[in-house]
Each structure stands twice: as C-alpha cells, then as structure tokens.
Image (tube, rainbow, N blue to C red):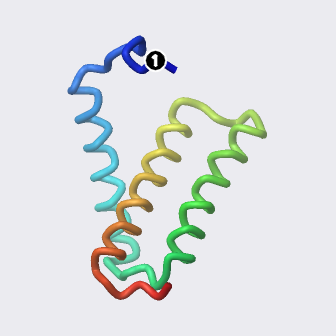
Amino acid sequence: MDHSKRDQMPVKVIADAIETVTNQVNYRLKGIGSGSMASVQEIVGVLRGELMIFETDLARGTSSLENTEASLSRLAASAIFGLASSRYGKLKW
C-alpha cells in the first residue's frame, strides 16, 4: 500500500493516543507495580493474551470503538513494559 495516500492524522490525535497509553502504563504501575517481566516468553505471552482478548471481542461481535481503544492501549502498555524489562537487562532467554 502506498502510505502517502493514507489520510494524515493531526499530531494532536497522535499525542492524545500517547497520553492514553501513558495513563494505561500508570494504571498498571499502581495496580501491579514496576516488576520486570522475567523472560522473552513472558513478554510474548502477555502480548498474546491481550491480543487474544482483542480478537475474541472481534469474533464475538462485541467490539466497539471504546473496546478497541482499550485493547490497543493495553497492548501498547504491555509492549512498553516488555521493552522496559528488556532494557532493565535481567530477561532470561
């Protein structure tokens, strides 16, 4: 696909999405703390779990814009925790 032909989003929309993910990260920090994920397999498992919830909502027809945004923000927050765990340097391979 020619990406130059896609609608170009305003920077404000992207900034709002980043804020939503930041809020999700903060929510997770308050709920489960800043504990590092233990392994790459755990990171993949967490991401797959979030993706499975997203896919299940779609398959059941229960997906909505609100559910989609919630699922995407949880996926993004999980990816950030995975990246932070990797940078922390204690992952078991």
Which residue is found at the position 28% from the left and 43% from the top?
18
Residue type pointed to by label 1: Asp
Q: Is residue 48 above or below residue 84?
A: above
Q: Position of residue 4 (x, y in %)?
A: 37, 16
Q: Is residue 85 left or right of residue 47?
A: left
Which residue is found at the position 35% from the left and 66% from the top?
83
Q: Is residue 33 above or below residue 2?
A: below
Q: Is residue 63 left or right of residue 3?
A: right
Q: Position of residue 28 (x, y in %)?
A: 37, 66
Please name whichever residue, 27 or 51, is drawn nearer the observer in this view of the structure: 51
Q: Position of residue 43 (x, y in %)?
A: 50, 71
Which residue is found at the position 68% from the left and 45% from the top?
55
Please name whichever residue, 5 or 56, is drawn nearer the observer in this view of the structure: 5
Residue labelled with disc 1: 2
Based on the displayed image, in which of its 4 quarters is residue 45 positioned? Answer: bottom right
Q: Is residue 4 above or below residue 91?
A: above
Q: Residue furthest front?
A: 2
Q: Position of residue 42 (x, y in %)?
A: 54, 76
Q: Is residue 50 left or right of residue 6?
A: right
Q: Is residue 34 above or below residue 5?
A: below
Q: How many marks?
A: 1
Please name whichever residue, 44 or 18, is drawn nearer the observer in this view of the structure: 44
> Alpha-carbon neighbours of circle 1 within 10 Å: few (<14), some, or many (≥20)?
few
Helix, strand or loop at disc 1?
loop
Which residue is found at the position 41% from the left and 52% from the top?
76
Please name whichever residue, 74 or 84, is drawn nearer the observer in this view of the structure: 84
Based on the displayed image, in which of its 4 quarters is residue 12 positioned? Answer: top left
